[in-house]
Amino acid sequence: MPGAYGWVWNHYFNKWERVPACVTTIRLTDAGPVVGGPHKLHWISCNPAAGLSEWQLSDDTDGESAVVLEHFHTERESHNTNLVPPKQFTTGIWLKALDQMTSITFGYV
């Protein structure tokens, strides 16, 4: 949406940043590509199928790069993770591992 912007406080750099007002969401049930190209990941919501579950993300388009963001759950409970400041991906967002998870949803710009 051209021209639709908001302002958020960047706690890392201690300043206000102008950001697009619309966040795109995508839900996955298996490992693979989330989105290609440079994007900022704002939040992740996951729904574990059992305890001892995890997800891993890499910054690439084929899943061959190192893990840059991961989360491990010992209990079977849903989690929402807000990334402040948003995590910058330069090549693309790839869901490298999705173990013992029913689904995972991403919010990115």
Image: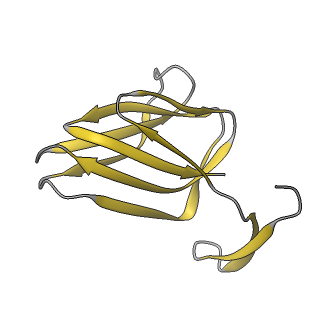
Residue at the location (19% across, 37% down)?
Answer: 100
Residue 2: x, y in percent?
Answer: 87, 56
Residue at the location (69% across, 33% down)?
Answer: 37
The answer to whether residue 15 is above or below residue 92 is below
* Colour approach in the figure: secondary structure
Q: Is residue 32 toward the left or the right of residue 51 in the image?
A: right
Locate the N terminus and report the quarter of the image it occupies: bottom right
Location of residue 90 by image quarter: top right
Please tell me how many numbered marks the rendered image carries.
Answer: 0
**Viewer-closest of 91 and 43:** 43
The answer to whether residue 8 is above or below residue 95 is below
Residue at the location (10% across, 48% down)?
Answer: 51
Residue 55: x, y in percent?
Answer: 32, 41
Q: Is residue 96 toward the left or the right of residue 41 in the image?
A: left
Q: Is residue 86 toward the left or the right of residue 106 in the image?
A: right
**Viewer-closest of 31 and 92:** 31
The answer to whether residue 91 is above or below residue 75 is above
Residue 108: x, y in percent?
Answer: 60, 51
Q: Residue placed farthest to the right in the image?
A: 3
Residue at the location (27% across, 50% down)?
Answer: 47
